[in-house]
Image (cartoon, helix red, strand yellow):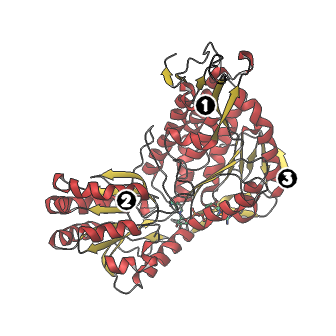
Amino acid sequence: MQQHQSTHSQPTGEMVIGAATVRGTEGSQRAFDPARNSEIAEPVFGLGGAAEVERACALAREAFDPYRALPLERRAAFLEAIADRIMGLGDTLIARAQAESGLPAARLQGERGRTVGQLRMFAQVVRDGHFLRATIDPAQPGRQPLPRSDLRLAKIPLGPVAVFGASNFPLAFSVAGGDTAAALAAGAPVVVKAHGAHLGTSELVGRAIQQAVADCGLPEGVFSLLIGAGRQLGEALVAHPAIKAVGFTGSRQGGLALVRVANARPEPIPVYAEMSSINPVFLFPAALAARAEAIGQGFADSLTMGAGQFCTNPGLVIAIDGPDLQRFVRAASAALAAKPAQTMLTPGIHQAYAAGTAQVDGVAGVEKVAAGLAAGEMPNAASAALYATDAQQLLSSPALMEEMFGPASIVVRCRSLDEMHAVAEHLEGQLTATLQIDAGDHAEAARLLPVLERKAGRILANGYPTGVEVCQAMVHGGPFPSTSNAMFTSVGATAIDRFLRPVCYQDLPDGLRPAALQDGNPLALWRLVDGALVQP
Ligand code: NAP
């Protein structure tokens, strides 16, 4: 591997390993433009292997203690410096991401806003210090029959984190996306494996983070970006002893492969994999009677947003059969018929969409009730598809419960509310479940809620699941297979908890305690003292 320092504004095909840029020598790859269906000539990316994994992980291990020991203000300023550096890339970043993803510039500008917004939100989370969960149970020397020691709890980061960039958010869930921001906020160095679908975008953002590390005078190993094949470099990264947790968004197969690697280590580590969800939408009778057309139109917009390439895409619609459901289907069909085909992120994702819809097409008792405009000559483009079947067919056809990643959904006709319940009970774990309800539906919706709470991480009423707010209360997670660990969220402020663990300090002298737990409360934190929340 050859190393040098550089300040290019266009990607060069190199990896970022600490303060160095490194050209991989384990093969090469060009980025791909899905809209033109051709490779992007420049640059050629050198792929990394075991040597680069070793170097990045060794640097991350070295950086861990000094980085986590920095004052919180410096950690927060670093997150803001990354956001500034990303904005400083200007249109170069948007143009490169557009060429590599086929996504429109406006969407990517919005996604960049979300990316820097996430980084700035985490800067605030770090400054607040609430994530440390500072808790003090003072000593009770006179307690009978035994005295109590002084016990104090605070959270520390797990250790260096491996992040796998997602294909469907080249900015907001990739190199400087939600997983990276949450891990850096927790005080954990990050080693990213770039997604092959946007190598140049990844490099540009990786260099921006590298510059922010230098701007802030941090240890170089706080961040590295590797390029290479998942099955070699990706698995080696997860297996490396310096890595203590993994963040992933992608396929069920890929996520489970990484869980297996993590569990087979001499020291198993947590993998936070967000994988597959079909996001059921339940249309209740009163809502359907009152506004079937509006619901149908809104559904079609949600289904086709971003060519359906969202983990929260509404892939299943459940309602009682009858004239009101027919009105919904007619309205959704009319709206979908006017939706143009859209370029998908990669030829592989396009092929998977074609295979998924073909599989559903082939199930007996399933009819295609609507389609979007045909792709014609557009390469790698998906047209929307709406299917219909009945509940009994759905319950007996595992293929209908699989995620079709793209703008396709299935309407499930039920005979009764009880049958809607049976479908809900049959669902695997989901990121979201949506209720379309009016006042007359509330009693029945209340009956369904306990089932949905068991199945989903977010339950929403009278909206659509696409569009995930980044905020304190967001949960973007859920039972398997929507994620590999239902106890956490990958979006929002509490995503930081995935990369933290509690440590209890018993009877330590005040000077040896972390600042969060010292008697003088130098960080001015709200703390739980003897079970009561105490203001600074
Ligand atoms: P993917 O194939 O799971 O790949 C995601 C990342 O994981 C890539 O960097 C990949 O590296 C790596 N990887 C995959 N398998 C691996 C393995 N066995 N060991 C180590 N690393 C591995 O996902 P994708 O490329 O984004 O899209 C493929 C399909 O995933 C889509 O068609 C869709 O069904 C699903 N998907 C779902 C969501 C969601 O949010 N639910 C989001 C995106 C994609 P390499 O590419 O180098 O192998």
Mark nearer the viewer, 1 or 2: 2
Disc 2 from disc 3: Cα separation:
54 Å
Query: Which of the two discs, 1 and 2, labels the residue nearer the N terminus?
Result: 1
Q: Is residue 290 above or below residue 124?
A: below
The numbered disc on residue 224 is: none
Mark nearer the viewer, 2 or 3: 2
Q: Which residue is mark 3?
A: 1
- Say which element carries label 3: loop
Q: Provide residue 525's location: percent of width, then percent of height.
A: 55, 21
Q: Amino acid at mark 3?
A: Met
Q: Amino acid at mark 1?
A: Ala
Q: Are marks 3 and 1 in contact (CB under 8 Å)?
A: no
Disc 1 from disc 2: Cα separation:
44 Å
Task: Determine whether, in the image, residue 85 is placed left or right of residue 190.
Answer: left
Disc 3 from disc 1: Cα separation:
29 Å
Q: Residue at x 71, y 16 (%)?
A: 510
Q: Is residue 228 visible?
A: no
Q: Residue at x 45, y 37 (%)?
A: 472
> Can you tell which quarter of the image residue 158 is in?
top right
Number of residues whose C-alpha sits closer than 10 Å to that of mark 1, classed few (under 14), some (14–19) or many (20 or more): many
> Can you tell which quarter of the image residue 449 is in?
bottom left
The numbered disc on residue 81 is: 1
Q: Provide residue 39's location: percent of width, then percent of height.
A: 62, 65
Q: Are marks 2 and 3 in contact (CB under 8 Å)?
A: no
Q: Which residue is mark 2?
A: 451
